[in-house]
Amino acid sequence: MTSILVVSGSVRPNSANSKVLPVVVQMLEAKGVSVTVADLAVINLPFYNDPLPTSAPEFAPTNEAVSAWTKLVDMADGVVLVTPEYNHTMSPVQLNAIDWIGKEWEDKPVALIGYGWRSGAGQAHATAREALAVNLKAKVGDDQANLFFMKDLNPDGTVADEAAVTSKLEAALTELLEATDVSA
Ligand SMILES: Cc1cc2nc3c(=O)[nH]c(=O)nc-3n(C[C@H](O)[C@H](O)[C@H](O)COP(=O)(O)O)c2cc1C
């Protein structure tokens, strides 16, 4: 069975993330996929503090949380990032999680799902794509799901327009599963 890792993007209490992420999980499970949630509030990664970059051949982190997080990404057939837009970029907690991993991102299918106000998650997605697709050589899907508050979502993250949200998520998740060579 295909395994997909769904990664949270907020560690705030009552975050919109905590409402959007379960919708993503539900859609994946309905497609017969095995889903693991990486809750970054629970994993609690340190801010990047290794003397070496992940690109160094000798890079070998000893931190347990980093090792557990690396294993989750390595074992997954594909990864979904659920990303809020903070100050015209992605949330720092999620970018820090990306930074901790090097070669495990290579050729990893990734779907971007994000939300925000005026441009939705447009700028968050741009940062995620630059880091993951351009620098780390992950296979980031073209169909990023860009969800807008007051149209697609209510400000607390609950779904406002079910048809629109379903259609945007469907496009991103279908592309992800195709990239993992799964017929779902
Ligand atoms: C530090 C911070 C910066 C933010 N900057 C933006 C922004 O640049 N664009 C935007 O659309 N929303 C911005 N917002 C509003 C968030 O999109 C909104 O608060 C959302 O609920 C955050 O996601 P979360 O609840 O999952 O943490 C910002 C929120 C925070 C906390």
Image: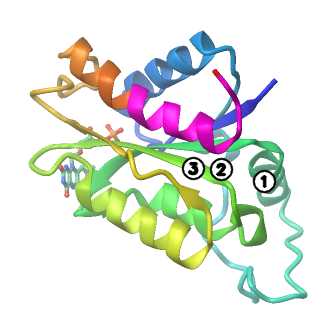
Q: Are marks 1 and 2 in contact (CB under 8 Å)?
A: yes
Name the side, left or right, on which 125 lies relative to 128.
Answer: left
Determine whether 55 is above or below 167 in the image. Answer: below
- In this rendering, which labeled residue sits more in front, label 3 or label 2? 3
Kind of residue indicated by mark 3: Val
Determine whether 63 is above or below 143 in the image. Answer: below
Residue 13 seen in this snapshot: no
Residue 159 seen in this snapshot: yes
Say how many tags the image has: 3
Tell me what residue is drawn at x 62 percent, y 73 percent: 136
How much space separates mark 1 and mark 2, taking CA atoms? Answer: 7 Å
Q: Between 137 and 97, which is closer to the camera in this rendering?
A: 137
Our reading of the magenta stretch's main secondary structure is: helix
Number of the label disc, if any, that sits on residue 65: 1
How much space separates mark 3 and mark 2, taking CA atoms? Answer: 22 Å
Callout 2 secondary element: loop
How much space separates mark 1 and mark 3, taking CA atoms? Answer: 21 Å
Task: Answer whether residue 63 is magenta in the image.
Answer: no
Question: Circle 3 sits on which residue?
Answer: 110
Kind of residue indicated by mark 1: Ala
Determine whether 68 is above or below 1 in the image. Answer: below
Question: Circle 2 sits on which residue?
Answer: 44
In the rendered image, residue 162, in percent from the top left (x then y), is placed at 25, 13
Q: Quadrant of the C terminus?
A: top right
Callout 1 secondary element: helix
Q: Quadrant of residue 50?
A: bottom right
Q: Which residues are magenta?
A: 170-183
Crowd class of label 3 (few under 14; some 14 to 19; many from 20; radius 10 Å): many
In the rendered image, residue 34, in percent from the top left (x then y), is placed at 73, 22
Name the side, left or right, on which 17 lies relative to 108.
Answer: left
Crowd class of label 1 (few under 14; some 14 to 19; many from 20; radius 10 Å): some
